[in-house]
Amino acid sequence: MSADQADPSGFNPLAMVDMWEDMHALVAEWELKHQSTPAVAAAAFEEFAAALVDRPTAESA
């Protein structure tokens, strides 16, 4: 990831705390819904995160 992607203009780094809490709750809900282990949920989330890196952004669309 380039520096431009890691720190976009106007992004509040403290928002990542909220994002982390939201993602944790979402993964916990997914584990319960699909009777998954934390390791399987982590692998699924890692794949999803990797896919986000390569998707077009609203700015480039």
Image (cartoon, rainbow, N blue to C red):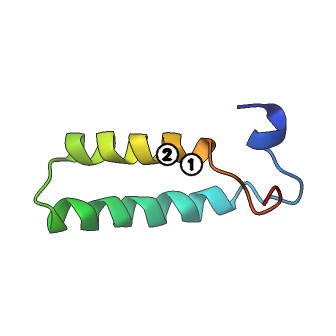
Q: Spot the residue most to the front.
A: 61
**Residue at 20% across, 59% down:** 31
Q: Crowdedness of circle 2 by 10 Å Cα count: few (<14), some, many (20+)? A: few
**Residue at 39% across, 59% down:** 24
Q: Which numbered disc covers residue 23?
A: none
Relative depth, front residue between 24 and 59: 59
* Horizontal and vertical percent position of residue 50: 51, 39
Question: Are dots 1 and 2 in contact, CB under 8 Å?
Answer: yes
* Horizontal and vertical percent position of residue 51: 51, 44
* Horizontal and vertical percent position of residue 3: 81, 33
Instruction: Specify the quadrant of the image occupied by residue 4.
Output: top right
- Mark 1 lies on a secondary structure that is helix
For the residue marked with disc 1, what is the amino acid?
Answer: Leu
Q: Which numbered disc covers residue 49?
A: 2
Relative depth, front residue between 5 and 57: 57
Q: Which numbered disc covers residue 52?
A: 1
Residues at marks 1 and 2, CA–CA distance in whole angstroms: 5 Å
Which image quarter is the C terminus in? bottom right
- Residue 60 sits above or below residue 54 on the image: below
Q: Spot the residue most to the right.
A: 9
- Residue 8 sits above or below residue 59 on the image: above
